[in-house]
Amino acid sequence: LPEVDSDPLIERCSLYVEVCCTMIFLTQYSVRFMTRPRTLLSFWGIMDLICCLPGVVIVVKGLSLGLAANPDLERIMEALSMLRAARIINFQMFHREVHIIGRVLKRSFHLLGIPAYLALTMWIVSSSLFMWFEHEWQDEGGQSENMSDLPSAMYWCAIFLTGEWAEVDFTYAGSRLCIFYVLVGITIFSMPIGILVESVQSTLEMISVEDEATRKLLKLSSSNLGETFSFCAPKAQ
């Protein structure tokens, strides 16, 4: 943040917070390495190791232990630091939701192939057409500056395909393409979303049935266990 970089006191306090968080995280990682070393080769074990690296580099750089200022290295560490947010889904309180999402993706994966291919084709082809139309007739105005290349056009078309029109001043050919977007493009692009929503509903219904069957099985097991104990217990004189 510019406000932090311009104030040495705030920057120093932020460094102390980073040092404390990094030490706590490294301690927890070391304890887990000694108790359960096999988990370090799992996905979350590797993710934890990657999350440790930015903190170590930032601490070493902040304490000026021979690490020269390197803007490229700083940007890389900042990018890796954002991966820490992904660890939220590994919290115990979110395990059920993550499990549901995993089942949904697994259940709908074989159905997403063709719709995803159609959506990707629609995105790339329409982005190319938008870029061509806006540059070919740029004397009419349009969005030739915002769609100077294919990646820029794909960025804006990704917004258009969700139904949000962040730009509205197009050339005549571009405005006709917008009509096609409204009638056909958005529908094709939303097909994978519809498949996922249907898969979420069916998965939740299946989980509800499984939970109900589990409760009945536990109730039956507890009643059978009680009858067994009452049968084996000696009768009172």
Image (spheres, rainbow, N blue to C red):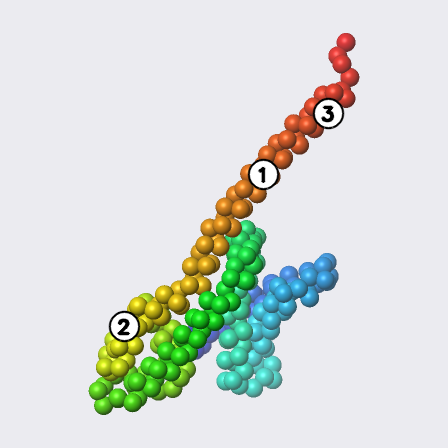
Residue with the mark numbered 2: 179
Q: Image point 37% across, 78% down: which residue?
A: 126
Q: Amino acid at mark 1?
A: Ala
Label at residue 228: 3
**Gap between marks 1 and 2 measured at Cα:** 51 Å
Q: Is residue 54 above or below residue 133?
A: above
Q: Is residue 2 above or below residue 234?
A: below
Residue 63, can we see it? no
Residue with the mark numbered 1: 213
Which of marks 3 and 2 precedes in the sequence? 2
Residue 90 position by quadrant: bottom right
Q: Nearer the viewer, residue 21 or 123?
A: 123
Q: Amino acid at mark 3?
A: Thr
Which of marks 2 and 1 precedes in the sequence? 2
Q: Image point 54% across, 42% down: which residue?
A: 209
Q: Percent from the top left, x then y, of residue 225?
A: 70, 28
In the picture, the quarter occupied by the C terminus is top right
Q: Image point 51% across, 50% down: which residue?
A: 203
Q: Amino acid at mark 2?
A: Ile
Q: Is residue 86 above or below residue 169?
A: above
Q: Secondary structure at mark 2?
A: helix
Residue 110 position by quadrant: bottom right
Q: Image point 55% across, 38% down: which residue?
A: 212
Residue 156, can we see it? yes
Q: Secondary structure at mark 3?
A: helix
> Pointer 2 and pointer 3: residues touching (CB < 8 Å)?
no
